[in-house]
Image (cartoon, grey):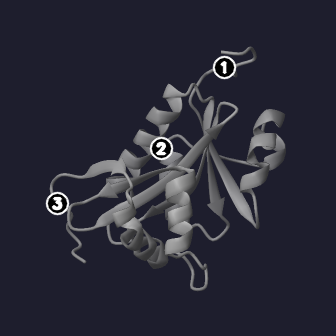
């Protein structure tokens, strides 16, 4: 794998032919024994909005998200360790936030494994995300997030709307 991406980075929807490359990327950045392989990636493909940052010769990042009750939840976010995080991370977050805004989401909640490295957390903070404790979230958001919080997870939140929606749209 080359350390230099093509000049054109494309953020696009993942397709079935990307499964092996996504699984390889995730394997590169997760601790040994995380147990994420092609079956899990296929589940992401069919159950979430799955985006890839395609550098031409290789995938530089992957993000999976879904929206429920006006909250976008991004629980898959992996970036190539041999590139600056902003190279693929910035465009992946922008695409996810753009799609979430179309659905009128109030916030994007990043669900991070507790082993997520500090440089990734700092990158997310630079992108406007704030570390939040479960107790500090609005009760509606906590209800949405229940199903995503298996095991030890940390949350980083970026508000996409100034005000919460309190009446049906």
Numbered disc in front, either 3 or 2:
3
Q: Earlier in the sequence, mark 3 or mark 1?
A: 3
Residue under pointer 2:
127
**Which element is circle 1 on?**
loop
The span from disc 2 to disc 1 (Cα, nearest Å) is 20 Å
Q: Residues within 10 Å of mark 3 (few under 14, many from 20)?
A: few
Res 121 visible: no
Position of residue 138 in the picture relative to residue 38 (left or right): right
Between 108 and 168, the one nearer to me in the picture: 168
Q: CA distance from mark 3 to mark 1?
A: 40 Å
Marks 3 and 2 sit apart, C-alpha to C-alpha, by 24 Å
Q: Nearer the viewer, mark 3 or mark 1?
A: 3
Q: Which residue is mark 1?
A: 163
Residue in the picture at 59% in, 24% down = 161
Badge 1: residue crowd in 10 Å (few <14, some 14–19, many ≥20): few
Q: Give the residue at the far bottom of this rendering.
A: 32
Which residue is drawn at the image coordinates 47% and 43% (left, top)? 127
Q: Which residue is mark 3?
A: 6
Q: Earlier in the sequence, mark 3 or mark 2?
A: 3
* Relative image position of residue 153 (x, y in whole percent): 71, 61
The answer to whether residue 15 is seen in the rendering is: yes
SS category of the residue bearing label 2: loop
């Amino acid at each position: 794998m080359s350390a230099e991406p093509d000049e054109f980075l494309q953020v696009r929807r993942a397709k079935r032919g990307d499964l092996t490359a996504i699984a390889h990327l995730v394997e590169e950045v997760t601790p040994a024994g995380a147990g994420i392989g092609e079956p899990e990636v296929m589940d992401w493909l069919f159950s979430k909005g799955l985006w890839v940052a395609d550098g031409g010769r290789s995938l530089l990042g992957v993000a999976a998200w879904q929206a429920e009750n006006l909250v976008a939840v991004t629980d898959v976010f992996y970036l190539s360790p041999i590139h600056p995080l902003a190279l693929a991370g910035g465009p992946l977050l922008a695409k996810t936030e753009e799609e979430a805004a179309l659905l009128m989401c109030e916030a994007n909640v990043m669900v991070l494994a507790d082993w997520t490295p500090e440089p990734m957390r700092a990158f997310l903070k630079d992108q406007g995300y704030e570390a939040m404790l479960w107790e500090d979230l609005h009760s509606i958001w906590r209800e949405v997030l229940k199903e995503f919080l298996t095991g030890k997870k940390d949350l980083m939140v970026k508000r996409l709307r100034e005000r919460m929606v309190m009446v049906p749209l």
